[in-house]
Image (cartoon, rainbow, N blue to C red):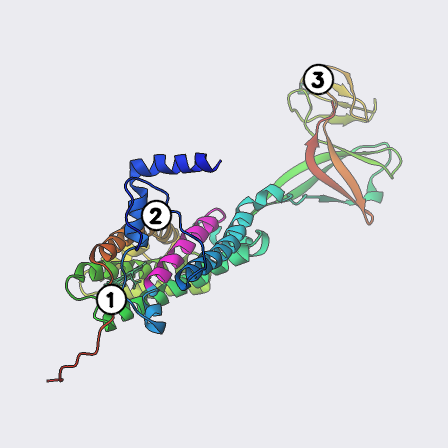
Amino acid sequence: MSAPQEPGCGCKAKPPENIGRRDFLTRATVALGAVIAAALSATGLGYFISPAFQRRDEDWVDLGRAGEFKAGSPALVEFTQRRRDAWVTSERRSSAWVVTADGKNFTAFDPRCTHLGCPYRWDAGSSRFVCPCHTAVFGPDGKVISGPPPRPLDQYATKIAGNRLMILPKAEKKA
Amino acid sequence: MKDCALAAYSWVCERTGLDQVWTALMERHIPEAKGWVGLLYTLGSATMMIFTVQAVTGFLLATNYVPSPDHAYDSVRYIDAAVLFGRVVRGLHHWGASFMVVFAVLHMLRVYFMGSYKYPREATWLAGVGLLLLVLGFSFTGYLLPWDQKAYWATVVGTTIAGQTPVVGAWIANILRGTDGMGAPTLSRFYALHVLALPALTAGLIGVHLFLVVWHGISEPPKRSPGKVP
Ligand code: HEM
Ligand code: FES
């Protein structure tokens, strides 16, 4: 309050000789305030942007003992998938075609035809998947043999945990 | 660079009077009060600081909270268990809520015992009474939101107390609860009050309160008068 009021908006340059009590307290308050503000903001910012670094839990589904799937004869397995979406848990009934040629390596197919989504079936006589809607035919490896589908059957990721066959029922498109 | 900043600064303050606002707010005369008496004058600012923290942490909590009976509890647990710094943010809001009441009351006590509510500061006091009621409103509505046993039954008790009012009690209780008995509308209603109505009213009234504080200037600490007690 000592310096005379300058007209307009002059910048009040203070001679910084030796710091008085008042200046010291001002600076100490500002510094302490800045530290507190920084700690609080860092916490809040971390909380707010944490979804950027968060990986979603993978919802693997247990389809049963791997040894129970017979080589060469695909099986349609029904399962219940429990999905955790933050604070919401939802359940979905679904199914997958499980194919194995040797009882060791497994492939799981999305049960919907890649043409327009009809449920296809296994034809044991010809060892092919056939779709009733527009007569698509797929091989046991999922490749299109004939008919209108634009791509092979969609697959789900599979893995063996212990002796259980696990799948991740999220379609991976095979071009 | 420096010239540029200076030019920007003068552009703004020639058009807004920012420097004068700054002088009026930050360089105004305040009473000389030493030691812990001086400290008593900071209680209002402390309350305001907590309000700011509550506003920020409250916003953050709202990004993960659902005011619905089937998800409220789980969403609060999710904040505690799964969100980065979730426990810290929730803890800040939880303790800030208690300390805001404590500091508002301490501030009121200092104003009372120093006689700072007297002419011409009655309006400041009345705005303060309104602020205290709003702070208590925050406490009452916020307490229900976790939707756990304590929250639920505390609100049953609180609204039942309101229901004891003669004649109109049953109406008041139902208006508070939004339904006959407690239920989903109670939670939504308390949430709406807690995050929409109360913050807006509080921010506005703090503005009035602070304007009056600056307008009248801060009162001097009372002096021992040499006169005799009659
Ligand atoms: C949200 C709650 C409140 C906030 C943020 C707040 C803020 C403030 C601030 C920053 C001051 C400046 C002086 C000081 O801090 O001592 C002040 C002064 C004052 N407050 Fe409050 N206040 C609140 C609640 C209350 C309550 C509950 C009352 C009384 C019922 C009250 C009555 C007053 C009065 C009369 C003054 C003028 C004191 C003087 O001139 O010496 N305030 N308030
Ligand atoms: S939907 Fe399967 S062939 Fe058209």
Q: Position of residue B225 (x, y in %)?
A: 17, 79
- The question of residue B132 being in magenta is answered with no
* Amino acid type, label 2: Leu
Task: Give the residue type at disc 1.
Answer: Gln
Alpha carbon distance from label 1 to label 3: 71 Å
Q: Secondary structure at mark 2?
A: helix
Tags 1 and 3 on a common chain: no
Residue identified by numbered label 1: B164
Q: Residue at x 55, y 44 (%)?
A: A49
Q: CA distance from mark 1 to mark 2?
A: 28 Å
From where the camera sits, is residue B46 visible? yes
From this view, report whether residue B104 is shown above or below residue A139.
below
Residue shown at the point (83%, 32%) measured from the top left = A73
The answer to whether residue A105 is above or below residue B74 is above
- Give the camera-side residue of A75 and B7: B7
- Mark 2, residue position: B196
Badge 1 or badge 2: first in the primary sequence = 1
